[in-house]
Image (tube, rainbow, N blue to C red):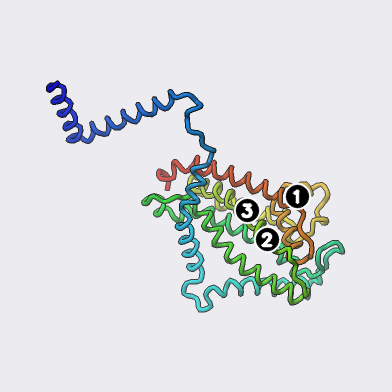
């Protein structure tokens, strides 16, 4: 017994003095534990929902997301005299430009079936969700490469970058939204209680944009032309969304593209909620939500798959 104890003590001291042997011993121990767990029956293995850890990581890092959103929003206007007031000035100038070009110069008219005959407000209300989506996707595409030092040199959850970019863009979106609601009250002398449903559609745009942003940002790490491809794709996508052109003016043979475009549902319903006095159809919210959830899940799985090699490429 004394000889066994002496041998065991000597082996433990040798492991502590030799780090290579200690690592080998720890590796063998982990392999034994894994083999024992794999030998357990399926009923006793812990069951996890796919993507559960990924979603939990987003929730647990909410403080970090808040700090990133705050920093991003402040950096946009750092050093400027007007500061965050530029969030009002830019959409105000855009609205004034639309009014002059389409009302004064082109005398643009809408069909009798539209929710309003005020073309500038009709156009601007449709632009709001598109600007939120396109800004999130476009900025997310290059976010990982831009933050390469932060991702590679620290334990940083890269998946929160598109989420933080969306939330930062949402703040500018809310400023522009307040401007539109004020303009509707001033010009059309109305306020629709349906605007209370806007957060549901913002959430749909958010999960859809973040899902697409995850795919684009992870591809950009390996294929540096992804940002350019995304910009070209967004250009085509813009004209396949009924922003400048009403739905009924699209050729009949191409209208199926509107049914496959989740932004088309959101644009139509934004106009109904901001300019009309009717609630948007529930089927539009369900259809857009289905596209959004699908993009969020696929984008999350895609990002998690490619994330393993970020440290070797960035």
Q: CA distance from mark 2 to mark 3?
A: 29 Å
Left/right of residue 155 with respect to residue 296 in the rendered view = left
Q: Which one is nearer the viewer's eye here, 123 or 226? A: 123
The residue identified by callout 1 is: 283
Q: Residues within 10 Å of mark 2 (few under 14, many from 20)?
A: some
Q: CA distance from mark 1 to mark 3?
A: 30 Å
Give the residue drawn at x 48%, y 33%: 46
In this rendering, the answer to whether 43 lies above or below 226 is above
Judged from the image, the secondary structure of the residue bearing numbered disc 3 is helix
Which image quarter: residue 14? top left
Judged from the image, the secondary structure of the residue bearing numbered disc 1 is helix
Give the residue drawn at x 71%, y 49%: 286
Of tags 1 and 3, which is closer to the observer? 1
Outermost right residue: 112
Q: Residues within 10 Å of mark 3 (few under 14, many from 20)?
A: few
Q: Which one is nearer the viewer's eye here, 64 or 301? A: 64
The residue identified by callout 3 is: 232
> Percent from the top left, x then y, of residue 193?
73, 66
> Percent from the top left, x then y, of residue 205?
64, 55
Name the N-terminal-most of marks 2 and 3. Answer: 2
> Percent from the top left, x then y, of residue 53?
49, 43
Q: Which one is nearer the viewer's eye here, 155 or 279? A: 279
In this rendering, the answer to whether 8 lies above or below 178 is above
Q: Which one is nearer the viewer's eye here, 286 or 135? A: 286
The residue identified by callout 2 is: 198
The answer to the question of whether label 1 and label 2 lie on touching residues, with beta carbons closer than 8 A, is no
Give the residue drawn at x 62%, y 53%: 232
Left/right of residue 207 with respect to residue 55 in the rendered view = right
Judged from the image, the secondary structure of the residue bearing numbered disc 2 is helix
């Amino acid at each position: 017994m004394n000889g066994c104890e002496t041998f065991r003590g000597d082996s433990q001291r040798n492991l502590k003095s030799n780090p290579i042997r200690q690592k080998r011993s720890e590796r063998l121990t982990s392999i034994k534990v894994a083999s024992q767990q794999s030998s357990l029956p399926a009923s006793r293995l812990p069951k996890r929902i796919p993507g559960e850890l990924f979603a939990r990581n987003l929730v647990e890092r909410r403080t970090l997301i808040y700090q990133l959103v705050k920093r991003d929003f402040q950096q946009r206007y750092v050093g400027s005299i007007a500061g965050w007031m530029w969030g009002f000035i830019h959409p105000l100038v855009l609205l004034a430009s639309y009014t002059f070009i389409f009302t004064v110069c082109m005398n643009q008219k809408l069909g009798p079936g539209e929710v309003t005959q005020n073309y500038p407000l009709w156009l601007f209300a449709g632009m709001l969700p598109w600007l939120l989506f396109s800004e999130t996707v476009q900025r997310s595409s290059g976010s990982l490469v831009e933050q390469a030092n932060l991702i590679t040199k620290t334990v940083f959850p890269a998946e929160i970058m598109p989420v933080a970019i969306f939330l930062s863009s949402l703040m500018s979106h809310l400023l522009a939204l307040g401007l539109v609601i004020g303009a509707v009250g001033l010009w059309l002398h109305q306020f629709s209680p349906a605007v209370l449903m806007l957060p549901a559609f913002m959430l749909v745009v958010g999960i859809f944009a973040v899902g697409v942003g995850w795919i684009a940002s992870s591809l950009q790490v390996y294929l540096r032309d992804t940002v350019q491809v995304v910009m070209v794709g967004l250009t085509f996508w813009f004209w396949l969304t009924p922003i400048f052109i009403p739905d009924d003016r699209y050729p009949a043979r191409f209208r199926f593209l509107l049914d496959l475009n989740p932004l088309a549902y959101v644009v139509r319903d934004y106009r109904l909620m901001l300019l009309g006095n009717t609630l948007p159809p529930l089927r539009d919210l369900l259809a857009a939500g289905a596209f959004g959830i699908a993009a969020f899940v696929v984008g999350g799985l895609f990002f998690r798959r490619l994330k393993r090699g970020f440290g070797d490429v960035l």
